[in-house]
Image (cartoon, helix red, strand yellow):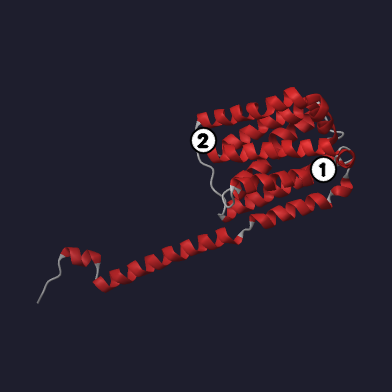
Amino acid sequence: MIEESPRDLANGPPEIESREDEAIGASENESASSAQYRGAASDPIFGFMIAAALSVGLTPLLPDNADLRYTLAWGALSGVSVLSWLLGSMERIGQERPENIGWGLLYGLLLGIPFMVFLRQPILEPAAAQMFPGMTAGSLLAFLVFVMPISETLFFRGLLQKQLPFWVVGALATLWNVVLFFPVMWETVIRLHIVTAVIVVILLLMNMVFVYVRERNGLAAAWVCQIVANLIILYVPFL
């Protein structure tokens, strides 16, 4: 008669261990499959189309309720980003290094100061007044520091840039700005074509810098860069 060692008694029969390993492996595969499904289920382009359609659909609110339209449109972008984060398809935000935040601040200054020096009176001041009609300085500050940078950074630089080339993300962000801002300043758009073209170029350059900073220094740096650029290019000329 062969006696079982204490080690054999502790570990159990080999066939039981094999079945337990198979069950653990199947559970892990099921969890991975579930996570992959949740990640694949969200379509950021569809979310972009919903937010853009909402922005167009809210055009009848203009010109008296431009702030409400902005809030709902940027809120739609934020909602899509938060859902994508909850469902697992958006990259998690990690701890940022202070030097990356500094680079975001620097790029925002380098982007905004030349526009401020050369285009403040002919372009930026009238454009800012028409983009944000009837707003107080405090309301606009909240939009440009909190609402706009958070929603656009999370959606375009946090969600969309993970799946598309950076230049496509910059072009889509510019298209979003055009859909959002141009109905508010429609008189300028249809009368002053050169001014309109300059505004489009400014928006395109801003968004390309934002996606570059995201690629180079991370999401928080892109967020800081947009806040600084907004303050210089849009807020100061509004005052």
Q: Quadrant of the C terminus?
A: top right
SS label for mark 1: loop
Which amino acid is tagged 2? Answer: Glu
To which quarter of the image does residue 66 belong? top right
| Mark 2 lies on residue | 96
Q: Is residue 100 above or below residue 51?
A: above
Give the mark, 1 or 2, whose residue is nearer the N terminus. 2
Q: Is residue 197 visible?
A: yes
Q: Amino acid at mark 1?
A: Phe
Q: Residue furthest front?
A: 194
Q: Report the residue at 51% width, 63% height from top.
A: 34
Residue occupying image coordinates x 69% and y 25% = 114
* Depth check, front residue: 174 or 192: 192
Residue 178: % across, % down:
77, 44
Residue 199's image quarter? top right
Q: Is residue 64 above or below residue 86?
A: above
Residue marked by disc 1: 182
Q: Position of residue 33 (x, y in %)?
A: 49, 64
Which of the two marks, 1 or 2, is nearer to us in this view?
1
Q: Nearer the viewer, residue 101 or 197?
A: 197
Q: Residue furthest bottom?
A: 1
Within 10 Å of disc 1 (Cα), the crowding (few <14, some 14-19, many 20+) is: some
Relative image position of residue 56 (x, y in whole percent): 82, 51
